[in-house]
Amino acid sequence: MRSGAQRQRGSASVEQAGLAALIALLALAAIAAVAAGGEIDAGRTLAGTISKRIACAPRLPDACRHHPLVPAYGWPLARLARALAPPPAARPGPAGLPLVPVDFRRCRRQSCAVPRSGAAGIHLTASGRRTTAFTRVVDRRRSQGWVELTYWLYRPGLGWERIVHRAGRAQVEAASGVRVLLKDDPALVPLETLPGRDHYDFPATERPPWQWNVHGLYPGWSS
């Protein structure tokens, strides 16, 4: 038999779930009303905003309004990371297919890393996967005057490619006007805020060299 405290906790959980469902229904009703009134674009904008908030909320214990690079590194280094990001070039894979860097959480087969033909610049693979690079930043500006940016590119069947840039204060300043947008290629994912990064399983030939070597920015959350 449950205690009174346990019953109260269970009741609170049900009430919270009901409240969340009610809010979701009200939001959907508002979107439908806007769309029905002819304001389709406004309805789509509202729907996009709500879906973005829902999607980004679990990603970081931080504000949803910025690219993940910003809470990880701050604006100056986020802009530098975007400015120095390597283009998502294709490399020949073991089966002879051209392979582009992808997000290992969503693509582990060579077939889903083949670039889409006919595209102006590589944005998506033939199976609809984003080209992706994982980043790590070592900031030594105060002590030694430089910052090191490492880009880790994963291609199924080829493993990991490491690209390193070291920049001084002048280069950080030069990147001050760079825009940091989610739509830019490749997508950039900071390892310092990637949850569970050390606990993904890989074949021995594709094990990430960065695994267990990156210090998380949110201890207990991004470890």
Image (cartoon, grey):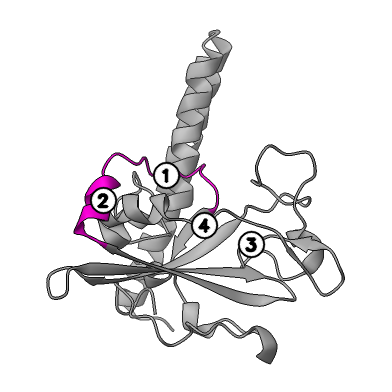
Residue to which mark 3 is pinned: 102
Of labels 2 and 3, earlier in sequence is 2
Q: Residue furthest bottom?
A: 204
* Numbered-mark total: 4
Left or right of 208, for residue 12: left
Q: Residue at x 45, y 37 (%)?
A: 50
The label nearer to you, 3 versus 4, is: 4
Give the CA distance from mark 4 to mark 2. 19 Å
Front position in the image: 138 or 204:
138
Most extreme residue toward the left is 142
Residue 175, magenta (yes or no): yes
On-image quarter of the C terminus: bottom left
- The location of residue 31, given as percent across then percent down, is 51, 24
Residue 134 lies, in percent from the top left, at 49, 66
The residue that label 4 is drawn on is 86
Disc 2 to disc 3, C-alpha distance: 25 Å
Q: Residue at x 33, y 49 (%)?
A: 79
Question: Which of the pair 160/68 is nearer the observer?
Answer: 160
Q: Decide: marks 3, 1 in contact (CB < 8 A)? A: no
Rendering quarter of residue 200? bottom right
Q: Is residue 153 above or below residue 18?
A: below
- The residue sitting at 86% across, 67% down in the picture is 96
Image quarter of residue 72: bottom left
The residue type indicated by label 3 comes to Val
- Tag 4, which secondary structure? loop
Q: Which residues are magenta?
A: 168-186
Closer to the camera: disc 3 or disc 1? 3
Q: Is residue 187 above or below residue 143?
A: above
Q: Amino acid at mark 1?
A: Arg
Mark 1 lies on residue: 53
Pointers 1 and 2 in contact (C-beta within 8 Å): no
Residue at x 68% of width, y 60% of height: 100
